[in-house]
Each structure stands twice: as structure tokens, then as C-alpha cells.
């Protein structure tokens, strides 16, 4: 499975707007380890971007 496909699956899962057939396809082809790693990376990027945005606004 490509890195792009894993990142796309995690991105749409953050918003909770995955189609059923896409979810089934991802579950059949993507390894859970890749989902966990991409999810953790996405969460870190999200938190860091919020911290940067808040510090920029309050500065």
C-alpha cells in the first residue's frame, strides 16, 4: 500500500467522512501498523500547527 493511500485514509478518518467501500478496501489492504504510525504523525502535525497558530495570533 502506498504512503499516499495510508495518509489519505488517516486524513479522512480524522474528519469522520469515510465511505463504507473505501473503509472496507483500506481494512483489507492497509496494515494496522501503518495506520497507527500515520495517525500519530497526523496528530503531531495537527498539534504543532495549532501551537504555532496560537503563538502567532497571541504574539
Image (tube, grey):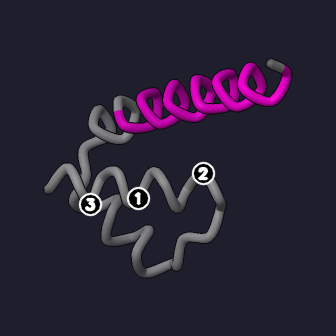
- Tag 3 near tag 1, CB within 8 Å: yes
Residue for point 80% across, 30% down? 57
Q: Quadrant of residue 2?
A: bottom left
Choose between 51 and 42: the one closer to the eye.
51
Q: Is residue 15 left or right of residue 21?
A: right
- Tag 2 near tag 1, CB within 8 Å: no
Residue for point 52% across, 62% down? 12
Q: Which residue is mark 1?
A: 9
Residue 45 in the image: x percent, y percent? Answer: 50, 31
Height in image: 42 above or below 20? above
The question of residue 18 being in magenta is answered with no
Q: Secondary structure at mark 1?
A: helix
**In the rendered picture of this protein, how many numbered marks are placed on residues?**
3
Q: Which quarter of the image is occupied by the N terminus?
A: bottom left
- Which residue ends up furthest to the right in the rendered image? 58
Residue for point 21% across, 59% down? 29
The question of residue 51 being in magenta is answered with yes
Q: Which residue is mark 3?
A: 5
Q: Is residue 28 left or right of residue 42?
A: left
> Magenta span covers which residues?
38-58
Choose between 9 and 30: the one closer to the eye.
9
Q: Secondary structure at mark 2?
A: helix
Q: Which quarter of the image is occupied by the C terminus?
A: top right
Height in image: 53 above or below 59? below
Q: Reading the chain from its start, which is encountered first: label 2 or label 1?
A: 1
Q: Main secondary structure of the magenta part?
A: helix
Number of other residues with Cα within 10 Å of mark 1, as a class: few under 14, some 14 to 19, many 20 or more: many
Spatial CA span between label 3 and label 1 = 6 Å
Q: Reading the chain from its start, which is encountered first: label 3 or label 2?
A: 3
Residue 21 in the image: x percent, y percent? Answer: 42, 81
Q: Which residue is mark 2?
A: 14
Residue 37 in the image: x percent, y percent? Answer: 35, 29
Amino acid at each position: 500500500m502506498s504512503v499516499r493511500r495510508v495518509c489519505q485514509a488517516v486524513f479522512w478518518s480524522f474528519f469522520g467522512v469515510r465511505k463504507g467501500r473505501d473503509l472496507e478496501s483500506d481494512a483489507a489492504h492497509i496494515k494496522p501498523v501503518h495506520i497507527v504510525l500515520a495517525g500519530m504523525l497526523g496528530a503531531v502535525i495537527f498539534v504543532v500547527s495549532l501551537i504555532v497558530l496560537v503563538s502567532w495570533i497571541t504574539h
